[in-house]
Amino acid sequence: MAKILYGERIGKTATLRVGTAAIIFDGGGQKILLTRRTDNGRWCLPGGAMDAGESASECCVREVWEETGLRVKVTRLIGLYSSPDRITTYADGNRWQVVALSFEAEVIGGELGLSDETTEVGYYSLEEIEKMDVMEPHVERIHDALLNQLSAFIK
């Protein structure tokens, strides 16, 4: 089960891991796609760790496909997140300081469904999201995306 730990420069105790997350709006642009993780039951944006030999945008596209069954294209960078004061720990002993790129992505095909990594998927409004158990770093990324700022956030 993934757990987030906070502490001043706690990232020094972990390994760097690059990942991506996708902000995918519904057709009306009012709701955002979230997935519920199988490993901890919490909600998050579709996304995950980058593999060697792929670009960040390719990672985003692949992760969305694997977790949701949707084909997407990346349309813009929302932000780069690399806090040294936060790490994610896993039951297998991995401890990661995540360097995450959050992208806005547009659905171009596929069919929304579940995977071995997800137990639920759906589009939710900000009001609904604020009542859900969403992973904290993803809440920050959602709020940043909704600001619709032209330049990317660097945090």
Image (tube, grey):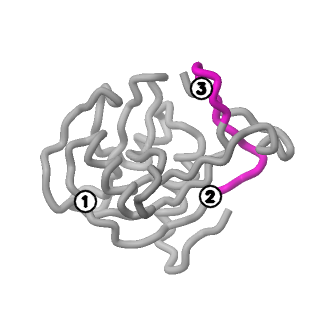
Residue range (magenta)? 82-95
Location of residue 123 with respect to 133 vertically, above or below: below
User: Which disc number belongs to residue 72?
Assistant: 1
- The secondary structure type at the circle numbered 3 is loop
Place of residue 94 in the rendered image (x, y in percent of width and height, measured from the top left): 63, 29
Disc 3 marks which residue? 90
Q: Earlier in the sequence, mark 1 or mark 2?
A: 1
Residue 93 included in the magenta stretch of the image: yes
Judged from this view, the residue extending furthest toward the front is: 53
Mark 2 Cα-neighbour bin, 10 Å: few <14, some 14–19, many ≥20? many
Disc 2 marks which residue? 81
- The secondary structure type at the circle numbered 2 is strand
Q: Quadrant of the N terminus?
A: top right
Per the model, the C-alpha gap separating discs 1 and 2 is 22 Å
Per the model, the C-alpha gap separating discs 3 and 1 is 28 Å
Q: Residue at x 31, y 51 (%)?
A: 62
Q: Residue at x 59, y 19 (%)?
A: 91
74 on left or right of 149: left
User: Which disc number belongs to residue 4?
Assistant: none
Q: Residue at x 38, y 56 (%)?
A: 60
Please tell me whether mark 3 or mark 1 is closer to you in this view: 3
The residue closer to the viewer here, 123 or 3, is 3
